[in-house]
Amino acid sequence: MTRFKLNYFDFDGGRGQPIRLALHIGGVDFDDVRLTGAQFKELRQSFRFHALPVLEIDGRQITQSNAILRYVGKLVGLYPTDELQALYCDEALDALEDLSHAIGTTFGLQGDAMKQARKELVEGRLATLIKGLDGILARGGGEFIADGRMTVADLKVFVETRYLSRGVLDHVPTDIVETLAPALAEHRERIANDPRVMAYYAR
Ligand SMILES: N[C@@H](CCC(=O)N[C@@H](CS)C(=O)NCC(=O)O)C(=O)O
């Protein structure tokens, strides 16, 4: 039997969380390795690009969250077989990478510098990305990103919109998604209420 080991940070968000969700939903047995910051520091050099997530398949390291997510999605039936629907999924996955990167540029800042950077983020790149994702959702029919059903793209959108609403990012309004894209906020609730997702968080 293939052995899967997912290395990521010890929190229910970020680039690793949609992969965890997809593996759980698919009933794939995997080693859910959750590293603290200190543990990551120690092991950092052992990961190919010195970053997480890293999926190990029978001991072989695979990096790049979207590549991993697509692979797992195909494995568990959460990725479209239709090429165009797959493209719709990929577009959302890559836009979410832009979103993570945009937020990442404000990490580590302090005081007024942080406040200013977050203000620019909220009014600029973040607003553009949220509205763009809203457009992708509308194109998919309004309920799901693609394929008329929940796919790995919905899981990744859900993880990010959930993160934005949790108040963990100073100076980012927790209702930013509701305000800019009500349908995307409804999407977050739709995915949160999917029995497979609920089962994961109820563990
Ligand atoms: N392109 C990579 C980016 C990976 C990445 O930047 N991961 C972050 C966490 S989400 C990380 O490991 N940061 C720690 C560091 O760079 O020291 C991917 O999509 O997996």
Image (spheres, rainbow, N blue to C red):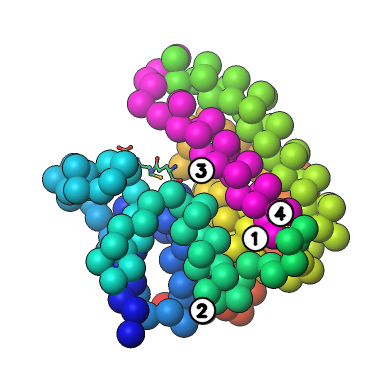
Amino acid type, label 1 = Asp
Q: Residues within 10 Å of mark 1 (few under 14, many from 20)?
A: many
Residue at x-position 55% and y-position 61%? 70
**In the image, residue 34 above or below residue 149:** above
Q: Is residue 78 magenta?
A: no
Q: Residues within 10 Å of mark 4 (few under 14, many from 20)?
A: few
Residue behind mark 2: 26
The span from disc 2 to disc 3 (Cα, nearest Å) is 30 Å
Q: Residues within 10 Å of mark 2 (few under 14, many from 20)?
A: some
**In the image, residue 201 above or below residue 154:** below
Quarter holding ligand 1: top left
Residue behind mark 4: 87
- The label on residue 154 is 1
The span from disc 1 to disc 2 (Cα, nearest Å) is 15 Å
> Which numbered disc, 4 or 1, marks the residue closer to the eye?
4
The local secondary structure at tag 3 comes to loop
- The label on residue 167 is 3
Amino acid type, label 3 = Gly
x%, y% of residue 155?
A: 59, 61
> Which numbered disc, 2 or 4, marks the residue closer to the eye?
4
**In the image, residue 172 above or below residue 195:** above
Q: Quadrant of residue 82?
A: bottom right
The span from disc 2 to disc 4 (Cα, nearest Å) is 22 Å
> Which numbered disc, 1 or 3, marks the residue closer to the eye?
1
x%, y% of residue 124?
A: 66, 24
